[in-house]
Amino acid sequence: MCAPTHTKIVNARTPHAQQPQARRTQAERRQHTRQALLDAALLQIESGESFDSLSLRSVAKAAGVVPTAFYRYFASMDELGLVLIEDSFRALRGMLREAREQPAAPEHLIQRSVEILTGYVRENRHQFAFVARIRATPNAVLRQAVRGEIRLFVSELATDLSRFPILNQWTTEDLQMLAGLLVTTMIATVEVLLDAPEDSPATDAEIRRNAERQLRLILLAVPHWRSRR
């Protein structure tokens, strides 16, 4: 007598337990697959392979798609690499720009910028490890793309620096030079972070302190520089 009752209860619950999840739209499915291809490439690079040694087939297989499907999202492996480079820099530039737009004393602005930089690199280690390796790659297309992103970084920073009263009489060339020094220091900080242990708050704190000191040292020269037009 108990078995039929049990079956009835289970059957009554089954429709609720097996409710299908909401289906993704076609655009969502495309974005998911595109991101899966990007992530697959990053994971293979993180495992020790160079980008130039990656094959389209291995990336597609790791992403769970057939090789021919790759071309629905990227024209070539180089194009995939260009997207990885652009994605790595775009969000970071935006976050640092927002930090500069908030009213703050220079020392607080430096501290906030370094916190954003180190936090973002830690959260996106795979992408920045890829960028660091690409800077030394024989692939001229990707190498030039990284240089282009760094130039854009410098240009945007130079524009923002010109809004500070102490710098608004500086020449464009001198503003670019100052921005270049600051960006070079930030890039060096990224490389130190990538070489440091991932789960070491004390190490990260030391890296942040050193970066802040280096940036402050650069800015100490600003009041003494005479920019000539």
Image (cartoon, rainbow, N blue to C red):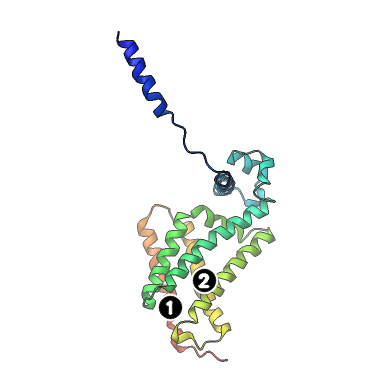
Q: Viewed as shown, does residue 36 lie left or right of 15?
A: right
Name the residue furthest left. Answer: 2
Q: Amino acid at mark 1?
A: Leu
Q: Viewed as shown, does residue 76 lie left or right of 14?
A: right
Q: Viewed as shown, does residue 55 lie left or right of 224?
A: right
Which quadrant is home to the C terminus? Answer: bottom right
Q: Position of residue 105 (x, y in %)?
A: 36, 78
Q: Amino acid at mark 2?
A: Val
Q: Position of residue 45 (x, y in %)?
A: 58, 49
Which quadrant is home to the N terminus? Answer: top left
Q: Secondary structure at mark 1?
A: helix
Q: In the depicted view, which residue is nearer to us: 38 or 143?
A: 38
Determine which quarter of the picture holds residue 228.
Answer: bottom right
Q: Nearer the viewer, mark 2 or mark 1?
A: 2
Residue at 41% x, 76% y: name it: 216
N-terminal of the pair, mark 2 or mark 1, is 2
Residue pointed to by mark 2: 183
Task: Check contact, mark 2 vs mark 1: CB within 8 A.
Answer: no
Q: Residue 120: tell me if it is visible.
A: yes
Residue pointed to by mark 1: 217
At label 2, counting other C-alpha atoms closer than 10 Å, the crowd grade (few under 14, some 14-19, many 20 or more) is some
